[in-house]
Amino acid sequence: MTFHRREVLGAFGVASASTLLWALGCGAPRPALRRAPQVSRDVRSWLQDAVARLSTIYPSVHALAVSRRRTTAALDVLGPGIARLRADGAVLTIRLSDGSSREHVTSELTADGIAAAVQALGAPRERAAIEFGAAPRSPAEPPLIDDGDLRHRVELLQADARPSSRIVYAAALIDIDDAIVWSVAPGRDLEQRLVRIRQAVTRAAWNGTRPVVADLHHAWSGWLDDQPLTPGDLAAASDAALKLMTPGAFHDGERTVVLDPSVVAIVLDTLVRGRLTATAPWPGRGAIAADLAGLSLAAGTGQPGNPRTAGAAQPLDNPRAATAPLASALITLVDDPTLAGAYGGFAFDDEGEPAAPLTLLDAGRITARLADRARGGAGRGRRPGHLGCVEPSSSHLQLVPGTTDAAQLYTDGLVLEAGLGASFDPASDRIRIACARARELKAGNATGRVYPDVELVGSLTALLTAADAVARVPASFAMRDDDDREPRWRSISTPAVRTRGLVRSRRTHA
């Protein structure tokens, strides 16, 4: 059989290297900013001057600036592609005496650009006498990587340890996001460098008349040689694509299920965003009603160069939900941005608050929720791309491991593998988790039957409270959401979990 380019890409739902780069935001229609690298001392001087001027008329002032470079290389059987982008900008935030706040965003990270932002906020030329503290040590500059070296590295990801004629499409990607972030406020002068690396491979193979696509992602903070994908990882991706699926219909029903770490990561991410942030509504209240009754989320569009405002808000409180367990007593969940090498980690958040671990669930009970300063929290105010509207967000979630080997979780039921995503309705507490495949278990052993395209559906709270075993060995996963081409970075470390729920064939592939 002969496969043409369009047929292959259309059948598997994947794309060529150039299309991958576009989808990842590296083919954006707006022009890339190409400026000489800013000198850290100059940027801090501009921000200090802005804070000193704004402090003469406003009780609380914060200045955040970022210089971000992104390099992405993609390679498939049809050719390579490399893209480089740079984005600079600053956010000046003022808080008024009534608790409300206002901010101005500029894409001009220059002395004139910062001065224009200060003027737009109505600050005079006079400066307040402010102590900013000791000057931070500038982070080390990582070595530059040329296109030849980058192509070689991405080609190594294509060197599959187990080639097969059934694999008709393969792709590899390396994404390097290098950001320098400055935070300046009265008594505070901070700087950090966040180099986030992602490696990904895709393998696609025919299984009879149907395609099977396997994706493998790995991400960390550091540099390219810190935690690269290994030949064993690449072989595992190929094995997943080549796995033969059991023909026939899958029978829907409630079963004991072992969620592999990729599925647990999706559940935890959904849990935190839907239940454990200050902006999350509680079931029975309705998302819209909760936002209107308990939260003030009025934020402007925040286009660069325009002022935007936000009102102070308090977390929505539900005393009954706060006392009732949200999950099994085996579930303890911590958000820790200080973990070395964590993809979602940081030294301080986008409001300048220093990083510190925060326990969200302790033995299944809520002990804290993520909140930015406007909502009564500290240390979790984050901005998409460091320049978007501030919002509470997780950094690096850690599910505390149990004491059981993963194989000992196996009983009669299913192992759900390769989580693809989830949809969640906060008002009804209903979750739907899509998985690439399910392996059947009998008496603690795999039967050899593997069913593709299944989903786990039901109540999120019921799913969590039914957990009766947690494995001891965790795996790490990274998530990078792009909101209008502005990324959100976070990561999760979790072992496998055994629970119970309704498993059925996927109703949609959207």
Image (tube, grey):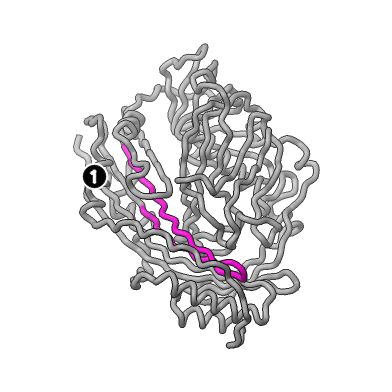
Element assignment for label 1: helix
x and y percent of residue 15 in the render?
32, 48
Q: Is residue 141 above or below residue 208?
A: below
Magenta stretch, main secondary structure class:
strand
Label 1 crowd bin: few (<14), some (14–19), many (20+), radius 10 Å: some
Q: Which residue occupies the foreground of this view, 68 or 13?
A: 68
The vertical placement of 157 against 110, above or below, is: above
Amino acid carrying mark 1 in the image: Glu
Q: Count the marks: how many?
A: 1
Instruction: Please tell me whether residue 180 belongs to the stretch shown in magenta.
Output: yes
Residue displayed at 47% across by 60% down = 192
Closer to us: 48 or 198 = 48
What residue do we see at 37% from left, 66% from top? 86
In the image, farthest residue toward the right: 319
Q: Position of residue 271 (x, y in %)?
A: 61, 42
Residue at the top extreme, as displayed: 443
Which residue range is magenta in the image? Answer: 176-203
Find disc 1 in the rendering and name its residue: 155
